Image (cartoon, rainbow, N blue to C red):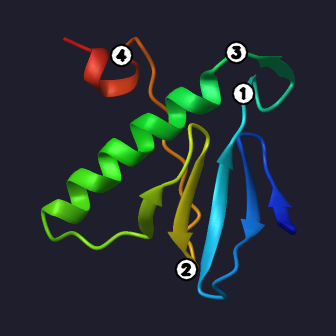
Amino acid sequence: MKLIIEGKAKKIFQSKNQNHIVQYFKDNATAFNNKKRKQFKSKGMLNNCISALIFEYLNENRIKTHFIEKISEREQIIKKVKIIPLEVVVRNYSAGSISHK
């Protein structure tokens, strides 16, 4: 497969179908605006499972997504789409106005 682009957490490959791509989940983790980096064994597999579960749920409830199917422990087939550049960060503590009493 031809590598299209590689980011911090994923690699994107062209699939045989021109309208689909293969998304590969890596074991990399970053913090502090990519200044701190580390690899965690099986992180990519866990991220793939969580992602597949979320998108399967959305698809089953008639919410259209780019997800087609999980094809391996680290890979998914997804539709080519124009993305909205959005990043969501989940923390284990409250911050900002939600933490004020």
Mark 3 neighbour class, 10 Å CA radius: few under 14, some 14 to 19, many 20 or more: few
Q: Which residue is mark 3?
A: 41
At a point 41% along the width and 13% down the height, the residue shown is 92
Residue 101's place in the image compared with 46, above or below, is above
Q: Which residue is mark 4?
A: 94
Ranked by sequence position, the earlier of labels 4 and 3 is 3
Q: Which residue is mark 1?
A: 27
Q: Please, what secondary structure does the residue beneath circle 3 have? A: loop
Spatial CA distance of label 3 from label 2 is 30 Å
Ranked by sequence position, the earlier of labels 4 and 1 is 1
Is disc 3 in contact with disc 1, using a CB cutoff of under 8 Å?
yes
Q: Amino acid at mark 1?
A: Asp
At a point 65% along the width and 63% down the height, the residue shown is 22
Ranked by sequence position, the earlier of labels 3 and 1 is 1
Q: Dividing the image into 4 quarters, which one contains the C terminus?
A: top left
At a point 31% along the width and 26% down the height, the residue shown is 97
Ranked by sequence position, the earlier of labels 2 and 1 is 1
Label ID, residue 81: 2
Q: Please, what secondary structure does the residue beneath circle 4 have? A: loop
Q: Please, what secondary structure does the residue beneath circle 2 have? A: loop
Out of 100 and 13, give the one closest to the viewer.
13
Mark 4 neighbour class, 10 Å CA radius: few under 14, some 14 to 19, many 20 or more: few
